[in-house]
Amino acid sequence: MRRGTRHPCVVGTHESLAADLRSALAGDVDFSVTARALTTMDASNYRRVPAGTVAPRDADDVAAALEVCRAHGVPVVARGAGTSIGGQATGTGVVLDLTRHMDGIVSVDPGARTAVVRPGLVLGRLREAVRPYGLTFGPDPSTYSRCTLGGMIGNNACGAHSVAWGTTADNVRSLEVVSYRGERLTLGRDGQGAPPGLLDLVDRRLALLRTGYPAGLPRRISGYALDALLPERGRDVVRSFVGSEGTLGVVTEATVRLVPLPAEPVLVVLGYADETAAADAAAGLLPLGPLTVEGMAADLVGTAVGDLPRGGAWLFCEVDGEDAARALVRAADALDTAVVRDPAGQRALWRVREDAAGTATRMPGGGDAWPGWEDCAVPPARLGAYLRAFRALLAEHGLRGIPYGHFGDGCVHVRIDFDLWTEKGVRDFRRFSEAVAGLVVAHGGSLSGEHGDGKARAELLPRMYGDELVGLFGEVKDVWDPDGGLNPGMLVRPEPLDSGLRFGNLPLVGVGREAARCVGVAKCRVAGPSSGPSVMCPSFRATGEEKHSTRGRARLLHEMALGEVVTDGWRSEEVREALDLCLSCKGCRSDCPVGVDMAAYKAEFLSRHYAGPGGLLRRPRSHWTMGGLPRWLDLFGRGLNTATRLPFAARLAGVTPDRPLPKVAEYTFASWFADRASARPPALTLWPDTFTDHLAPEVGRAAVRVLEEAGLGVALPPGRVCCGLTYVSTGRLGAARRVMRRTLDVMEPEAGPVVVLEPSCAATLRTDLPELLPDDPRAARLAASVLTFAEALETLAPNWTPPRLDREVTGQTHCHQHAVLGDAADRRLRERAGLTGEPAGGCCGLAGDFGFEPGHEQVSRACAEDQLLPALRSAAPGTEVLADGFSCRTQIAHLTEWRGRHLAEVLAEAIDVGGEVP
C-alpha cells in the first residue's frame, strides 16, 4: 500500500477481520452494533464509524491485533477514556480499547519517585496509589477521574499544576511501544528506541528544527515535538513521541516520574476587575513559584460567585505553605483576596474549575457551545492582549464563548456557540477557525495548548509551522509508520476540519438532538466507589461498561437517530439493552455538566419502542404491574397482600422472587386523615402519594403531626391524585399524561403550597409534569407550588423550633432529591434539630421498580455497595438512619438489619416523647 493512502474499511470485510482477530488474541473482539456505536465519537465535534473494537489483554495482544489489521489493510486507533476534544480518539478501522484489561500499575518505586503503568490506567487511580508515599503524578487534567495515562501520553496532557510540574512529556521517563508493523521498541533518551532512519532524517534538517518552533511557549502541544531529537536536547525519543496522538505507535507500558505532594497546600483566590486584568496579572506571579495559576471569569462561575472574593474574574493560585500564600497576596495587586486553608473548602472551589469543560457548553440564557478552539495557548506575557483580541474576534463573527483556563501557562479553554447543524453554520465555523488560527500565530502561540490537534486543528498546522516543517512531520510519520495504519488523518495529511462533523443528518428535534448535547467529557464514566455528592452514573460504577454510562447511552441514542450504525430506530434492541440498566435516578440531570437527562430519554424511548402493533404484548409484565402500582393499589388495596403470597405470584407479576414485595397497609393514610378532626384552617395541601398512602401511612401521619405542631393547618386534595411517576419510569407516557390530566382536574381549584413527602413524586411534579404537558398552564402552576417537607417548614413556619435530638445520622439522600429538589433545606432542618452527620450520597439501587425486575439484582446491590451499605456498616449503634424515599427505606430493609425512617417520623417521635403519633 502506498504511503499516506486512506484505508478502505468495507463492511463486507469485517466478518473475516473479526474472525482473524479472535483467533489471534486472548482479549475481547467486539464488532457488534453496540461496540461500534459507542466508539464513533470522543469528546469532540467529530464522528468516524469504526469496523469494530478490540480490548487487548497485554502487549502480545496489541502486537497480534496490529499484525492482523495490517494484513487486512485496516487502520488502528488506540483509545483510552475517549475524552479527547480534537477527534483523535475516533477511527474508521479497529479501535483498541486499552481501558478494559491494560489498566494496571506494574510497580511503584517511592525512592526513585517513579511508577510503571499500563496505558489504560486512570490517572486518579495512580494518584490514589502513590498518595500514601507523599507523591503524585504532576499533570492533572480536570478529567483526572476518568482520563487514562495512555491518552495523556497521546495528547501530551497538562492540567492545572503544569506551571510547577510541566506537561506529560516532562514526566515520562521511558515508553514501551509497538509499531503498526509489530516492532517492540523501548523509547528513551540518547536516541534509544528510534526507528531506523529517524535520527538520520533529523540530522539532515537540524537548521529547520532549531528555528521552526516558537520560543517562550510552555504549552506548545501542536504537531510533533521533533526538536526534542536535537543533539543539544539529548535526542530524547520518548519526549518526541509524547503528543503524537497515536499516529506513530501504540504504548503498552510507561515509566513515569512522580513528584512530592505539597506539604501544606493553600489556595489563594485573587479577584480582579475582569478577565483580561486577571490574565495580565498571571505571568507576574510565576516568579513566586505557585503550583497553579488558573483563571476564570464571572460568566463561567455562575452562582458560585458568592463564595469568591470581590471581582469579575479570579486567579486560583495554589501554593505550598502560609509564607508562600502571604508572599503571593502581597505581590498580586488584586482587588480582593481569599486564602482557603480548609481542604473541604478548597475541594469545593476546585470543583467549579473541574466542571468547567462541561459547564462552558451551556451558554448563559440557554443554547449549546462546542469545542473546536478549546485550548490554544500563547506566551503567558501576551495572554491579556490575546484575550482582548480573541473577544473582539468572537464579536466580529457573531459568536459567544466563555474563556477560562491555565492563565499561568497562557492556555485558554473556550467553547463557542457554533451552529454546526446547518451548512451556513459549518462554513462560519471554518471561517472562524482560520481567523483564530491566524490570531494565535500572530501572538506567537500554539494552536493546541493541552489536548492535541486531532482533526480540529491539524489542517491549520502550516499556519503555525510553515509548509516545510509540516512536510517534515509527514516524513517522520512515514519513518515510524510506513504503511500509514496508525490513526490516519490525524496530525499528518489531515482531513478537512469541517468534514465528518457529528451533527450532520441528525434530526433537529427529539431525543437524538437532546442526546447530541452530550459532549463526551465522561464525568459519568467514573468507576466506583464514588466520592462527594455525585450520583451519576450508578450503573456504570456497578458494571464498568461504557454502554451503561450516561455518555454511552447518549451515543447509542445519537446513532439511533442517525440510522447508520443503529438501523432499527425506536425498535433497536441495542438501545433498549443499554437503557435497561438505567435506574432513572436523574443523577445526570444535575451531575452531568450539560444536564443530559437520561431518565427522560429512557421514558421516551420505551414509549416509542413498545408502540404500534404488538407493543402491548412485548412489554415486560413489570411495566403493567409495578408500573401500574397506583391503579392496582386503588383497586385492590390490602387485598394485594393475599395475592402476592400466592405461588408463582412473582413470576406472574414479572418481578424477581428474590425480593419480598412491599406489604400494603391495613389502613391508608387518606382514610386515617378523613377520620380525624382538625379545627385548624389549612395552610397547605399535603400530597397523599401512592407510597405514603398505601405502603407507608406512618410517614403521612408523622408529617401531619409535625406540620400541625409548627402551626400549619393541613388539608388533602379533594379527590384521588397521582403524579404519574410509575407510568413515566416504565415509559407508559400516554397513561402518564392521562393520569396527570386527571390529577390537574382535581387540583385545579386548589391554591397555595403543596407539600410532597416522597422525593420521587415531588421531583416528578416539578419536572416531568410540566415537560410532559407543556401546553397545559395548570401543570406549570402545580409544579411551582410543590414543596418538600423541609422546605414547607422553613418557608411556611420560619419561627418554629424543631425538637432537639442530638444524635448522629446516616442513611440515604434520595437520588431525585439530589438531582431535582436539592437538600439545602433538609440540611438546615437537621442542623436545627441537632442531627449531625450526613446521609450517604449515590444511589440506593432499588430505584422504584428497577430492583424488582428480574436480572437487576446484582446491579441493584452493587449500587447500594457504592455508598449506602458502607455507610450503614460503619455507623455506630444508636445512629439514626434517615431515608425519605420509600425505595431507599425498602432497600435498607432488604439488605440490612437497619430500619430507615423519614425525617418527619423522627421529628414526630421527638415531639411526642415516649408516646405514639396519633
Image (cartoon, rainbow, N blue to C red):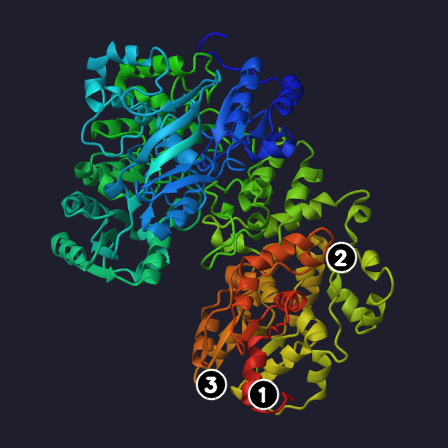
Q: Which residue is mark 3?
A: 804
Q: In the figure, 915 relative to 536: above or below?
A: below
Q: Quadrant of the C terminus?
A: bottom right
Q: Nearer the viewer, residue 288 or 681?
A: 288
Residue 20, percent from left and from top: 64, 20
Secondary structure of the residue carrying tag 1 is: loop
Kindly report which numbered mark, 3 or 1, lies closer to the viewer in this rendering. Answer: 3
Q: CA distance from mark 3 to mark 2?
A: 42 Å
Q: What amino acid type should be assigned to the residue bearing mark 2?
A: Thr
Residue at the (74%, 76%) spot, across then down = 665
What is the number of callouts on the image? 3
Q: Which residue is mark 1?
A: 681
Secondary structure of the residue carrying tag 3 is: loop
Q: Which residue is mark 2?
A: 656
Q: Earlier in the sequence, mark 1 or mark 2?
A: 2
Q: CA distance from mark 1 to mark 2?
A: 46 Å
Q: Using residue 422 as the reference point, say whether residue 605 is left or right of it.
A: right
- Residue density around tag 3, few if under 14, some if 14–19, many if 20 or more, within 10 Å: some
Q: What amino acid type should be assigned to the residue bearing mark 1?
A: Pro
Q: Nearer the viewer, residue 763 or 892?
A: 892
Residue at the (47%, 69%) spot, across then down = 838
Secondary structure of the residue carrying tag 2 is: loop
> Can see residue 812?
no
Q: What amino acid type should be assigned to the residue bearing mark 3?
A: Arg
